[in-house]
Amino acid sequence: MTNNPPSRRWFKSSRSAQGNECLEVYLDTNRVGVRDSKNPGGPELFFTNEQWDRFLGSDIWDR
């Protein structure tokens, strides 16, 4: 885990209720990060692009 990458790279879903009840996503060329939008100074998880692609393509969404 890493804390506080540049804030300009964190994105929230436009569907987030009142703009603060979702995950935020960090994008860069080598990794994808996620964090709780209600706690931007809290824990952050980072994945390689390959790990993120595998997660999105997994069957977890079919359950």
Image (spheres, rainbow, N blue to C red):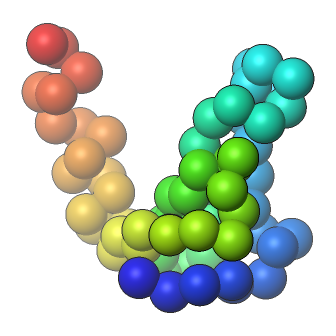
Residue nearer the viewer, 3 or 46: 3
Q: Residue at x 34, y 74 (%)?
A: 48
Residue at 33% in and 57% down: 52
Q: Position of residue 50 (x, y in %)?
A: 28, 66
Please identify the quadrant where the C terminus is shown.
top left
Q: Is residue 30 left or right of residue 15?
A: left
Name the residue: 50% across, 69% down: 44
Seen from the viewer's position, the closer of residues 37 and 8 is 37
Total marks drawn?
0
Q: How far from the left and from the top, in percent, is residue 16?
A: 74, 25
- Residue 24 visible? The answer is no
Q: Is residue 1 above or below residue 42?
A: below
Residue 17's place in the image compared with 22, above or below, is: above
Quadrant containing the N terminus in the rendered view? bottom left
Residue 28 in the image: x percent, y percent? Answer: 61, 75
Residue pushed farthest top? Answer: 63
**Residue at (59%, 84%) from the top-left corner?**
3
Horizontally, residue 20 falls left or right of residue 57, namely: right
Residue 47 in picture, x, y percent from top left: 36, 70
Measured along the vertical axis of the image, is residue 14 above or below residue 8? above
Q: Does the rendering let one see residue 54?
A: yes
